[in-house]
Image (spheres, rainbow, N blue to C red):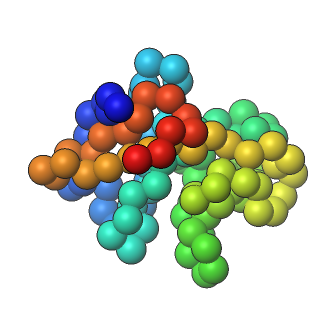
Amino acid sequence: MDFIRVGTLAEIPDGELRGYDLPGGRVAVAHVDHHLHAVGDTCTADGGSLSEGVLRLEREPEVKCACGNRFDLESGEPSDGGGSDPVPTFAVRLVDGWIEVAPFPGVRT
């Protein structure tokens, strides 16, 4: 499977997320407890950017967009708010300090 190098781990301190461009659209990459998660960057309820949202770590890791919708970082499923459709999830890996993301959603390593 091909992966696309999007940035370095140093760009995303633990507990933060960043947005990156892929050929098929933007992806939000979160660094949570030394694990990486990648989801589509667009909130399915209002179209806002998830990479500009806030990580919530009380239970399962999730991202909360500016309008209040929350999405599980593992499954992409909405966990609260007005989002009724899941956001796509992407395979993500770390190779020699570089973050690499699968170019298409739903692909697992």
Q: Is residue 25 visible?
A: yes
Quarter of the image for residue 63 reads bottom right
In the displayed structure, 103 sits above or below 19; it is: above
Residue extending farthest bottom: 58
Residue positioned 21% across, 55% down in the render: 10
Residue 82 picture location, percent across and down: 87, 51
The front one of 27 and 103 is: 103
Q: Is residue 45 left or right of residue 16?
A: right
Q: Is residue 11 left or right of residue 58?
A: left
- Image position, residue 65 (x, y; %): 66, 51
Q: Is residue 96 left or right of residue 13?
A: left
Nearer-the-camera pick, 59 or 103:
103
Relative side of 6 to 32, left or right: left
The answer to which quarter of the image holds residue 23 is: top left
Q: Residue at x 83, y 58 (%)?
A: 81
Q: Is residue 43 above or below residue 104?
A: below
**Residue 4 drawn above or below residue 87:** above
Task: Using the rendered view, name the quadrant where residue 32 is placed.
Answer: bottom left
Please state the horizontal and vertical placement of residue 61, each as a whole percent of the image: 57, 69
The answer, for residue 63, to whether it is visible in the render is no
Q: Residue at x 32, y 28 (%)?
A: 2
**Residue 16: x percent and y percent?**
42, 61
Farthest residue to the left: give it.
96
Front residue (pair 75, 41): 75
Residue at far top of view: 23
Please tell me which residue lies in front, 104 or 15. Answer: 104
